[in-house]
Image (cartoon, rainbow, N blue to C red):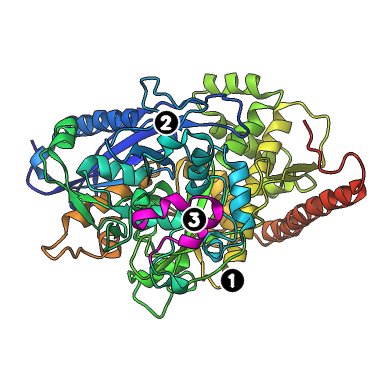
């Protein structure tokens, strides 16, 4: 077994699977494992979509993966010095008296043996609760982009209060999922700034007059006054009074005997405070060694100084895309969540924009096209996935048509793709898709052009988000991508050209998030007797690996075309809202006013 150097484990819990990696002290990944986790979608007669998981099932998947990476890497378990966690921003519920999972499945909230105690981030059951919260116009809403999303956790807690038997709700304590995992690992109820500030309305002490972090008047106003009792003990308490709050990777405690036995590791390993999964993507990407020109750097600081992070947008792209940017001071951007202080590096602020569907949008536009099944068979016969196959086909089409670029082929086709609503920067869940230039073409060629237009939309909307953030005070000059979309060469080219800035692709394309989690383990392991740890940026600078840079193609004609299409894209977004408003105005006072399409 290898034990000549220290090792660290990263644990990433996504929507569909748990992933674990083990890295050495240089940041090299020695082994990687994935295990699917269960997802329940009960239909219980309530409004909104329901998605549930189980911390018991998730922990079992984590244990399986940890044992697998230890076996595959042949790393001596005694050389593992730190563990870091990230997870989706989902709500986990336990009893405060017996520490058992509390079922979240209405209407009876009985345990079916699966310990379904997690309401997943994408669960939209608390629509009415989110509306009630936002109607308060409480000052803390400034720090979540002006509105609390139905995907955040306080609306879900309020839904449980409104639907659970009162005696069961009175026994509940609440965690963000990543904090629940550090709790299971250590037995300590430490909360992370990342989880509570970003998704639970916690305002760090000293920000805007915040005294306890939790806002008592807010809880009383929305109907959760019973959680104020005993200094918010059921939400994690008050830092330094009856609770403990930490920034990313700070030492929560040692791995407990029980958890160590389940994971196949020695007890006492340092456990770092966790982060939301997208934030682990920021950690795993923006510290990468890159060769950028002075135009893409802050030339007033060293190339590896933490202030360089202010110029770098982390785009964590999968089913949807999350855009993360750091700033020295608070920057308020309409339609962008935050600013959040202390969540990754103490004293610094984060902003979080996003696209509701990117990978899912491409998948949907292809799978609903009449030519999809036949084209998929052709791709499989060629030994390619559908995206690589269509990318090659698009290049052939441009060549065959003697087009100066693929963009030229769709110059008169205008696709707007907010099929799932808009997260940033419009922040309107009622936004929908639109197409101008639709024809009767049912062929593979037609599907390929629709697919390209979908990628064009994703790139143009990324430009819109960056421009909104920079107009408000950010200084973004480059995009650091992670996730499966990095492997799509045409999409990355489009992103760089449409946004007119370099796109950086990490070495570990599909493991940037779990790699970031492992760095949290390294930070926790660096703790001195007084609890201080090595700065996170220093660890990122040391452990991040060089990536590939995609530059704007520099074709003036294509840039001019994409600039024109960007203006049309903005017009499509604006006119859609105007059309809805015009129709709503026309219906005022009629029997149809306020009715939704069934």
| Circle on res. 472 | 1
Closer to us: mark 3 or mark 1?
A: 3
**Residue occupied by mark 3:** 219
Which comes before the other along the chain, label 1 or label 2? 2
Q: Quadrant of the C terminus?
A: top right
Residue 195 located left or right of residue 256: right
- Give whichever of 525, 413 is nearer the camera: 525
Please provide percent x and percent y for residue 138.
57, 63
Q: Callout 2 environment at 10 Å: few (<14), some (14 to 19), or many (20+)?
A: many
Question: Taking the image as drawn, is residue 86 in sight?
Answer: no
**Residue occupied by mark 2:** 53
Q: Secondary structure at mark 3?
A: helix
Please provide percent x and percent y for residue 303.
35, 71
Residue reaching furthest front?
A: 167
3 and 1 marks in contact (CB < 8 Å): no
Q: Secondary structure at mark 2?
A: strand
| Residue plotted at (70% across, 56% down) | 562
Q: Is residue 429 above or below residue 324?
A: above
Q: Quadrant of the N terminus?
A: top left
Task: Look at the image and give the residue range highlighted in magenta.
Answer: 212-231
Residue 244 located left or right of residue 91: left
| Residue plotted at (49% across, 41% down) | 161
Q: Is residue 208 above or below residue 553?
A: below
Question: Dominant secondary structure of the magenta stretch?
Answer: helix
Q: CA distance from mark 3 to mark 1?
A: 30 Å
Which comes before the other along the chain, label 3 or label 2? 2
Residue reaching furthest bottom?
A: 300
Please provide percent x and percent y for residue 135.
64, 56
């Amino acid at each position: 077994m290898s034990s000549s150097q220290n090792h660290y484990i990263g644990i990433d819990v996504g929507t569909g699977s748990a992933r674990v990696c083990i890295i050495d002290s240089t940041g090299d990944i020695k082994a990687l494992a994935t295990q699917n986790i269960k997802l329940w979608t009960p239909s219980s007669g309530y409004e909104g979509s329901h998605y549930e998981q189980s911390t018991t099932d998730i922990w079992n998947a984590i244990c399986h993966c940890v044992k697998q990476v230890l076996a595959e890497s042949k790393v001596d378990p005694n050389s593992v010095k730190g563990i870091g966690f990230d997870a989706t921003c989902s709500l986990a519920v336990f009893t405060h008296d017996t520490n058992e999972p509390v079922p979240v499945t209405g209407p009876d909230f009985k345990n079916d043996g699966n310990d379904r105690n997690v309401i997943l981030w994408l669960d939209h059951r608390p629509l009415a609760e989110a509306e009630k919260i936002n109607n308060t116009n409480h000052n803390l809403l400034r720090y979540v982009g002006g509105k609390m999303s139905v995907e955040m956790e306080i609306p879900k807690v309020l839904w449980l209060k409104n639907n659970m038997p009162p005696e069961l709700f009175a026994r509940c304590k609440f965690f963000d999922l990543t904090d629940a995992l550090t709790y299971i690992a250590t037995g300590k109820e430490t909360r992370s700034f990342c989880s509570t500030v970003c998704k639970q309305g916690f305002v760090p002490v000293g920000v805007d007059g915040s005294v306890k972090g939790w806002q008592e008047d807010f809880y009383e106003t929305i109907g959760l006054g019973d959680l104020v009792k005993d200094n918010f003990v059921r939400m994690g308490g008050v830092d330094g009074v009856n609770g403990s709050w930490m920034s990313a990777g700070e030492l929560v405690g040692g791995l407990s005997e029980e958890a160590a036995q389940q994971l196949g590791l020695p007890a006492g390993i340092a456990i770092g405070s966790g982060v939301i999964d997208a934030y682990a993507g920021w950690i795993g990407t923006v510290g990468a060694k890159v060769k950028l020109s002075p135009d893409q750097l802050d030339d007033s600081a060293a190339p590896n100084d933490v202030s360089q992070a202010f110029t770098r947008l982390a785009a964590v792209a999968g089913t949807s895309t999350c855009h993360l940017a750091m700033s020295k001071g608070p920057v308020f951007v309409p339609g962008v969540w935050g600013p959040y202080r202390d969540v990754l590096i103490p004293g610094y602020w984060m902003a979080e924009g996003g696209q509701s569907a990117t990978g899912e949008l491409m998948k949907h536009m292809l799978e609903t096209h009449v030519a999809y099944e036949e084209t998929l068979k052709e791709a499989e016969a060629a030994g390619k996935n559908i995206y690589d196959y269509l990318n090659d086909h698009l290049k052939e089409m441009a060549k065959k048509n003697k087009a100066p670029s693929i963009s030229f082929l769709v110059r008169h086709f205008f696709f707007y793709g907010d099929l799932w609503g808009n997260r940033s920067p419009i922040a309107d869940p009622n936004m929908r898709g639109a197409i101008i230039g639709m024809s009767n073409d049912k062929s593979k060629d037609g599907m390929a052009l629709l697919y390209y237009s979908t990628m064009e939309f994703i790139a143009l909307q990324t430009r819109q988000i960056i421009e909104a953030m920079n107009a408000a005070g950010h200084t973004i000059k480059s995009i650091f991508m992670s996730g499966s979309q990095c492997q799509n060469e045409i999409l990355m080219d489009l992103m760089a050209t449409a946004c007119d800035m370099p796109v950086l692709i990490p070495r570990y394309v599909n493991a940037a998030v779990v790699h970031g989690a492992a760095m949290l383990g390294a930070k926790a392991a660096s703790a001195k007797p007084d609890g201080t740890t090595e700065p996170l940026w220093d660890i990122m600078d040391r452990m991040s690996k060089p990536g590939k840079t995609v530059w704007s193609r520099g074709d003036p004609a294509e840039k001019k075309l994409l600039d024109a299409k960007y203006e049309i894209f903005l017009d499509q977004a604006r006119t859609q809202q105007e059309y809805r408003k015009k129709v709503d105005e026309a219906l005022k006072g009629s029997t149809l006013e306020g009715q939704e399409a069934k």
